[in-house]
Image (cartoon, rainbow, N blue to C red):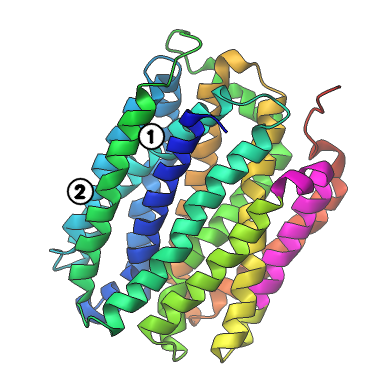
Amino acid sequence: MNKVLILVNITGLIIGISYGLHGPILPVFAKNVIGATYSELGLIGLTNFIPYMFIPLFVGILLDRINNGYLLAVGAAMNSASIYLLSIAQSVPEIMGFRVITGIAHAFFWPPCESIISNESSEKNRVRNISWFTMFFVIGFMVGPLLGTLFLESLDITYRILFQIAAFILAAGIITSLLASRKSVRNHHEGFSFSSIKQMKKFPEVIILLIFCTSSFGIILTIFPAFLNDRGMTASDILLLYFVFGISRVGSLALAGKFARYTSQTLIAGTIAVSIGLAISIYAESIIGFGIALVLMGFGFSIFFPLTLEIILSKTRKAISGKIIGAYETIFGMGWAIGPTMGGPISQSFGNEMPYVLFCIIGIGVAVFAIISRKKLEPQRVLN
């Protein structure tokens, strides 16, 4: 692994730790300290993800024109500031405003990392390298909750101080991003154009799977912690459960290279795993039950990313890969926005378990669709 990939992976690890340290506890903070309802939790999640529906398109254009390491450093700086601001939030609108900044910042973090990795990889090792980057991020997201548990229980700090610590940790990502920028070289310089984004229309099967996966994922990130709290899980229990969630994701990503040999079958299995995990969540009453559900969903959510991205990149000209990555990430943003938008009001109006019932049913339908469309869920194989 070359130095650029190492620096990008370290950046992903740092940002993952920060996200894991504050992310799972934010819904609990908003509900118990600020007094947010489930509908307001959905709105907080929506404001976080709405920028990701649009900003990646513009970042994707910049990826083919500006040093990707600089864009990554901008994302790390904005992210650190937005998380620090959470520590002074006093109302739901303030939290929503700060999460908008986080959503914009994330669009300057993830697509540049993907672009750097794609440019530094051959077609044969691209899935592995993207999986390793995601795995480093998830390892950080897994370690973060453990640190949060330590801070909350052993040091008896407040949620607000926890957000400040997360912000300072994330700021270290600015340094590794700038180091990566010294070695990151732009390979092509096409003009500004949105025409290449139309390439995504060639992958309707991938888009359907992604929207289901990211919508479900959005609920697990924004609504599920509060649901766990209502089911009797303490803040430390929730952080421990997201640590288990991280273990499942890391294990899946470590094996992504092998799973790539059976892309369509793995995507079908991932969809089924998410659906089963959602079903278990409806009836679980203990930390073990919720742990099993999160292990299944961790596998499904994580394996989708490298395999679906490879399907698209393998059938796309490298000259427009930056724009395609931006369009691909926009699909993620759409799903992440749909999940909280639906999940919050549904929880508020029909019971806090209803979002998981609905998405479980949708998941079964998507799994059937994936089985029917499995031939189109394979990448263009590289010939030896």
Query: In the drawing, does residue 166 fall left or right of residue 323?
Result: left
Give the prevailing secondary structure in the magenta stretch.
helix
> Residue drawn 66% across and 61% down?
299
Estimate the x, y position of residue 345 in percent, counting from the top left.
43, 70
* Coordinates of residue 253 in the picture (x, y in percent): 64, 52
- Depth order, front residue of 129/66: 129
Residue 169 visible: yes
- Choose top left, top right, bottom left or bottom right for residue 7: top left
Q: Quadrant of the N terminus?
A: top right
Q: Quadrant of residue 121?
A: top right
Q: Callout 1, which amino acid?
A: Ile
Q: Which residues are magenta?
A: 256-279
On screen, residue 277 versus residue 260, left or right, reads left
Is 261 one of the magenta-colored residues? Answer: yes
- The residue sitting at 70% across, 25% down in the picture is 123
- Marks counted in the figure total 2
Q: Is residue 360 left or right of residue 138?
A: right
Q: Which mark is residue 81?
A: 2
**Magenta highlight on residue 123:** no
Q: Position of residue 72 (x, y in %)?
A: 36, 33
Quick one: SS at disc 1?
A: helix
For residue 128, the mark is none
- Please give the label number shown on residue 55: 1
- Do residues under tags 1 and 2 come within 8 Å of each other at their CB atoms? no
Instruction: Provide residue 337's location: percent of width, then percent of height.
Output: 45, 52
